[in-house]
Amino acid sequence: MICRKPRLQVQTSKAGDTNMQYDKLYNHPVYKKAGKIIFFGNQASYDHQEKKYLFDKIIEQKKLLRILQPEHGLFSNAQDQDIVEDLLYKNIPCISLYNKITDITGPQKHMFSDADTLLIDIQDAGVRYFTYTTHLFNLLEFAARYLQQISVIVTDRTNPAGKKAEGTLLPEKYQSFLGYAGMIHRHGLSTGELCKWFVQSRNLKLNLHIVQIPGSFSNKNYIAPSPNLPTIESLWVYPGQCFWEATSFSEGRGTTRPFVLFGHPDIPSIVSEQIAMAFNKKFEGMAYLRSTKFEPVFHKHKSKLCTGWQIHLQNHQKYPDIFGSLWLMREVKNVVNFNFWREGPYEFDSDFNAAQILIGDDDLIEFVEGHIPEKIITDKLKFHASQWKKEIQNLE
């Protein structure tokens, strides 16, 4: 069954407040009854009240059978698309769900042998191309098909990107490890609400229990869920700035400000300044660009001096992340004289290129190309956001 959860409360910061509190989980009857738990999560699963990882707590309770690792690994140490290998953590087997050497990029039956409970505690980033969401959905789908005897507990974490929904719904042809069909770019849902949407949209039957984990998000207690979201600022701009992965531009990987910094070695400074001026006028009061230079220490344009920008958010709730980045990409593509798009297949399970599976909408790509007027795109974005809101308004 799916347990109803109370309306999410975002707590204000007070003396003694903590970022995550697992009391409701520890006291949940299904968890208390659990004897052999399979845990899926990573370093963001940290109890700031007890000052220990959730998986350490489960080990102390002698309940932890195995850990399933997402892309980036248990401690978010592996870079994007890097192989995550199996390992031992305090004599507990940690099995990779992203090991392309062994061709394991999803759950398998042997991972759940002798288990009675699957516990999922994963920090989402609020967008469909965050691969932890795909891991989550794959586990739910697998449990519905093969693990009817196992109880599934999902902790309901607040969405740190907020409740705003933006973008367009992903068509079936562009479904990949970077996004399930039917999802919008920025979904605005908590982890529990994501689960409810997926279960209802796929008509899945499983023994699912959603447990609310109250908390607030702040720079003080923020734990990076993945290596290139080191700060809340990176996470807030990620919904749109992730699109730069689909281009020849550095999206800031290899710097201390991924997705906040972005640029290219062949951009003249005068062009960077002109683009910044245009952007700042367009999105005045919401965000602005600062023309700058940076040198990635790895990833695209390693050890090359890039000219580009840092995006500064003034009001992250009002700034339209998806449209803002698309508009910016259109302006930049219009003035560069080198290849703008990243070529070739991007993800292991799709033959489409990065633009197709990340942006996931032919009209949005054509807008960046300069072939579709802005009004048509803004109307489409509004329509898809309204369709998404209708779809999620009756989650049970």
Image: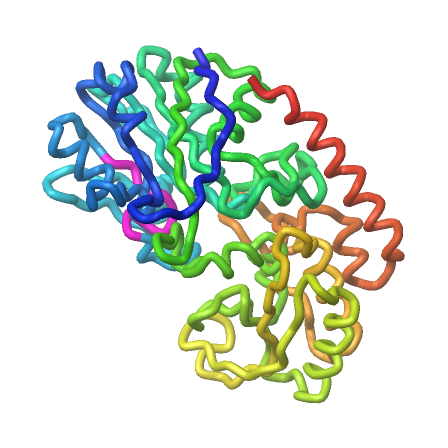
Report the front residue among 390 and 145.
390
Residue plotted at (14% across, 34% down): 59
In the image, is 305 to the left or to the right of 59?
right
Magenta segment includes 171: no
- Name the quadrant containing residue 213: top left
Whether residue 109 sits left or right of residue 219 in the image: it is: left
Residue 319: x and y in percent read: 68, 56
Which quadrant of the view contains residue 153?
top left
Residue 6 relative to residue 214: left or right: right
Q: Where is residue 333 shown, x and y percent of the image? A: 75, 71
Magenta range is 67-75
**Image point 47% across, 28% down: which residue?**
192
| Up/down of 6 relative to 314, above or below | above
Q: Nearer the viewer, residue 377 or 318?
A: 318
Which quarter of the rendering shows the N terminus? top left
Residue at (61% x, 56% y) in the render: 316
Give the percent coordinates (x, y) of residue 89.
Answer: 16, 44
Quarter of the rendering occupied by the C terminus: top right
Image coordinates for residue 346, horizontal then vertical, percent: 55, 54
Q: Residue at x 43, y 31 (%)?
A: 156
The answer to whether residue 372 is left or right of residue 151 is right
Give the total of numbered labels: 0
The chosen color scheme is rainbow
Magenta segment's dominant SS is loop
